Image: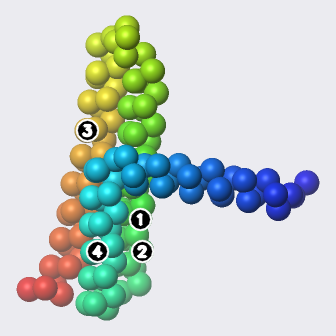
Amino acid sequence: MFHLKNLYKSFKHAFLGLFQVLREEQSFRIQISLAIVVIILAFYFRITAWEKIALLMVIVGVLVLELVNTIFERLSDVFKPRIHDYIKQVKDIMAAAVLIASGGALVVGVLIFWKYIF
């Protein structure tokens, strides 16, 4: 059964988590700032709807991956007293995933904005 109170609680917790990450994670704040700049440029240059969709997809992908990276980092920090080399590897691999997604987003952005800027 659908309960509005449960839906409200779910959204409340989601926003609490989002604001916590915004407060505590510098890389997430940088990515949000870049996303805002890209969105402003998209409207300034009046890019096509498909180009906006592509940009939105890569922006959301990078932000979600950064959130997942933060989750893995925090969960692995629970094991810090008996840190294992695998934990370091997991953190490094997650950082690499964010790096690759960010690089892909950069390429998509350059391909889209190139014709509008030059």
Which residue is the site of mark 1? Answer: 57
Q: Which residue extends farthest top?
A: 82
74 above or below 68?
above
Looking at the rendered image, the quarter that the C terminus falls into is bottom left
* Marker disc for residue 71: none
Identity, as a three-letter code, of the amino acid under mark 2: Ile
Q: Where does residue 29 sit, x and y in percent of width and height? A: 32, 57
Which residue is the site of mark 3? Answer: 96
108 above or below 65?
below
Q: Is residue 66 in view?
A: no
| Disc 1/disc 4 C-alpha distance (Å) | 12 Å
How busy is the neighbourhood of tag 1: few (under 14 within 10 Å), some, or many (20 plus)? few
Identity, as a three-letter code, of the amino acid under mark 1: Met
Q: Which residue extends farthest left?
A: 118
Which residue is the site of mark 2? Answer: 53
Q: Nearer the viewer, mark 3 or mark 4?
A: 4
| Helix, strand or loop at mark 4 | helix
Badge 1 vs badge 2, beta-carbon distance below 8 Å: yes
| Helix, strand or loop at mark 1 | helix
